[in-house]
Amino acid sequence: MKVVEKFVSINGEGTRAGELAVFIRFKGCNLRCSYCDTMWANEADCDDTEMSPEEIHSYIKSTGVKNVTLTGGEPLLQKEMNTLLEVLLSDKNLRVEIETNGAMDLEPFTGEYRPVFTMDYKLPGSGQENAMKESNFAILGKEDTVKFVSGSKEDLDRAKEIIEKHDLLRRTHVYFSPVFGSIEPVEIVAFLMENCMNDARLQIQMHKVIWDPEERGV
Ligand code: SF4
């Protein structure tokens, strides 16, 4: 498996935001979002380390951290992902979450060794909405999260349409996250209030507040 970064930090997003997590960042992505802050990890010439699922598990255990975040790039592009999930989820001391971009079919990863999914739905401002697989919404449940990274009023309005169409607030966690530098968080709060959007949450990317927004490995 092609790993470009591995490190311990805090989870910046999702239901375990603020808790320690060990991150495994995989190389490559099938999208090109306008606001991507990890594009370097998607380039063909980015340095990577080839690691087997067992080696990744050993590294995770060496950290002593329980929360595991598999990220990218797009982690579900890795051919051995199901093997890795089996290895990690057979270890009952670990809690495994996958951050995925909404363009991958989740169904092949919903067997006995199913992780928690934090799935993006890419809004118009990303330039990638056409790649979204709406069929994935039927797979998400109470443990999972849909994240709408929003950079404009148009994005917010589209997110509302998708939330209502798929009844997401009742079925899973729903987070709004601002595109850093494009929209003020207060605009998202106003949107949530205007639409009385109970159960949806604003989430600021903590890493961008705690560290330099360009910092890697945090
Ligand atoms: S899906 Fe994520 S990693 Fe891929 S281009 Fe978009 S923001 Fe970047």
Image: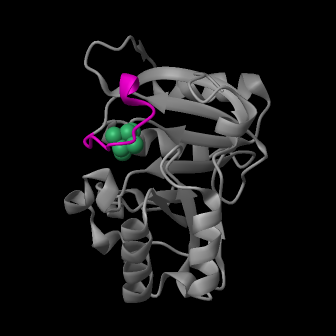
Residue 144, quarter of picture: bottom right
Residue 150 on the magenta span: no
Camera sees residue 55: no
* Region rendered in magenta: 30-41
Quadrant where the C terminus sits is: top right
Q: Is residue 142 left or right of residue 168?
A: right
In the rendered view of the protein, which quadrant contains the N terminus? Answer: top left
Decide if residue 148 is in sight here. Answer: yes
Where is residue 27 shown, x and y percent of the image? 37, 27
The residue sitting at 75% across, 34% down in the picture is: 210
Pick the front one: 49 or 207:
207
Which secondary structure is most common in the magenta stretch?
A: loop
Tell me where residue 74 sits by quadrant.
Answer: top left
Task: Say above or below: 164 vs 162.
Answer: below
Q: Residue at 58%, 22% (x, y): give it.
A: 216
Q: Nearer the viewer, residue 118 or 36?
A: 36
> Image quadrant of ligand 1?
top left
Q: Quadrant of residue 196?
A: bottom right
Q: Position of residue 142 (x, y in %)?
A: 60, 75
Q: Residue at x 53, y 21 (%)?
A: 5
All told, the count of numbered labels is 0
- Whether residue 37 is in magenta: the answer is yes
Judge from the rendering whether residue 185 lies leftward or rightward of residue 16; answer left or right: left
Q: Is residue 181 above or below residue 15?
A: above
Image side of residue 130 versus residue 110, left or right: left
* Residue 45 coordinates in the image, percent (x, y): 28, 12
Q: Residue at x 49, y 50 (%)?
A: 179
Asked whether, in this view, residue 40 is left or right of residue 179, the answer is left
